[in-house]
Image (cartoon, rainbow, N blue to C red):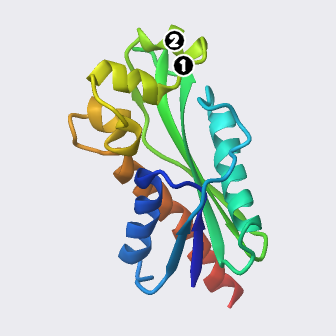
Amino acid sequence: MKVIVGSRNPAKYKAVQQELINLGFENCEIVALDVDSGVSNQPLSDEETVSGAMQRARNALASNVDADFAIGLEGGVVLGASPTSGVMVCNWGALVSKDGREYIAGGARIPLPEAFKEELIAGKELGDLMDEYCQRKDIRKQEGALGIFTDGAVSRMEMFQHVSKLLIGQWRLNGKKQA
């Protein structure tokens, strides 16, 4: 089996890789590709984040037609979604199979500091805000905002593992129905 991941971000492709192993696909070939999401660098709604995940999956599969499926994972924020904060982290994934079936799944949400809202609206990316907030580099490739704001209880990779598991499970179930 061959799977394409529509990102070279380690938190994303390692999440897919680990979940494939966890679900019994140990001998699966996994290829990580940088592909265009077709959305802004910082999606500001569920709709935009879903669209980015779907475009990543579609573009990844189109670039490697011998793959069984491709997965696109996208992190974003939702403005005005929380009663305690004006901004929440969101994350979505999409799986597109070689036979044209498409699946989506969403993951964890937690509030972000209210102070982030204006900078996000002004076009700053959450990853850059997190680097400034933590005085570190590449938070988005490591534990992510989710890991920081859960004190390490759930990392960005674990969040994307959960989304990957939801996607692969849907794909696997439909394969059983087709057989």
Report the Cα–Cα distance between label 1 and label 2.
Answer: 6 Å
Q: How many marks?
A: 2
Classify residue 28 as left or right of residue 178: left
Q: Nearer the viewer, residue 89 or 1?
A: 1
| Residue located farthest toward the front when viewing the structure as drawn | 137
Q: Nearer the viewer, residue 130 or 48?
A: 130
Give above or below for 36 relative to 43: below
Classify residue 136 as left or right of residue 169: left
Residue drawn where x is 22% and y is 40% of the image = 152
Q: Are marks 1 and 2 in contact (CB under 8 Å)?
A: yes
Q: Secondary structure at mark 2?
A: helix
Which residue in the protein does label 1 denote?
124
Give above or below for 114 relative to 54: above
Circle 1: residue type:
Lys
Classify residue 164 as left or right of residue 65: left
Q: Give percent across and percent down for residue 48.
A: 68, 35
Label of residue 27 in the image: none
Which residue in the protein does label 2 denote?
119
Classify residue 92 as left or right of residue 153: right
Residue drawn where x is 42% and y is 54% of the image = 10
Q: Residues within 10 Å of mark 1 (few under 14, many from 20)?
A: some
Q: Quadrant of the C terminus?
A: bottom right
Q: Give percent across and percent down for residue 61.
A: 71, 67
Among the two numbered marks 1 and 2 on one chain, the one whose residue lies closer to the N terminus? 2
Q: Give percent across and percent down for residue 47.
A: 68, 35
**Residue 64, quarter of the rendered image:** bottom right
**Residue 62, quarter of the rendered image:** bottom right
Residue drawn where x is 31% and y is 42% of the image = 143
Circle 2: residue type:
Glu
Q: Give percent across and percent down for residue 16.
A: 46, 64
